[in-house]
Amino acid sequence: MLSCLFERMEVNGMDKITKKCHVCGGEMEEGFLLDKNKTMQEPTRWIEGEPRKMMSGVVQFSNLRQFIVEAWRCEECGNLLFTAIKENNGESWTGQR
């Protein structure tokens, strides 16, 4: 199983956790993937199970567990790490964790 290395450091008197890349050991920076359509923009979600299309062609995902995806990018090699961090079952995204 691949994972990041976590490192605690103090920045301006506050405790900060940094992540190290499992590929090259470089520092990871946090970001996000954006889902965008004509009416809204919000972070990407991981949805359990396989996609199920309705007769209209729209993917049905109600009653399935959903998680906001956190993304990290290595500043050295560009490796990306995605983590499903917070369960969000269809509510509008507020930007809060």
Image: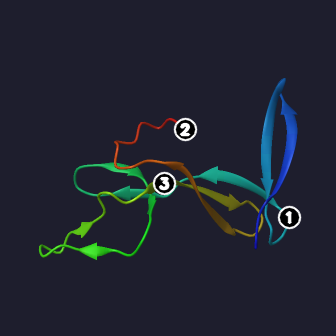
Crowd tier of the residue under label 2, counting other residues whose Cα lies within 10 Å: few below 14, some 14–19, many 20 or above = few
- In space, the residues marked 3 and 1 are separated at their CA atoms by 27 Å
- In space, the residues marked 3 and 2 are separated at their CA atoms by 11 Å
Residue 84 horizontal/vertical position (percent): 56, 57
Q: Which residue is mark 3?
A: 67
Q: Which residue is mark 1?
A: 25
- In space, the residues marked 1 and 2 are separated at their CA atoms by 27 Å
| Label 3 with label 1: CB-CB less than 8 Å | no
Query: In the image as oriented, which residue stretches furthest toward the left?
Result: 56
Residue type pointed to by label 3? Phe
Q: In the picture shown, does residue 10 fall above or below 75?
A: above
Residue 47 horizontal/vertical position (percent): 43, 63
Residue 79 horizontal/vertical position (percent): 69, 69
Q: Pick whichever of labels 3 and 2 is earlier in the sequence.
A: 3
- Residue occupying image coordinates x 78% and y 53%: 19
Q: Which residue is mark 2?
A: 97
- Residue occupying image coordinates x 17% and y 75%: 57
- Residue occupying image coordinates x 34% and y 42%: 92
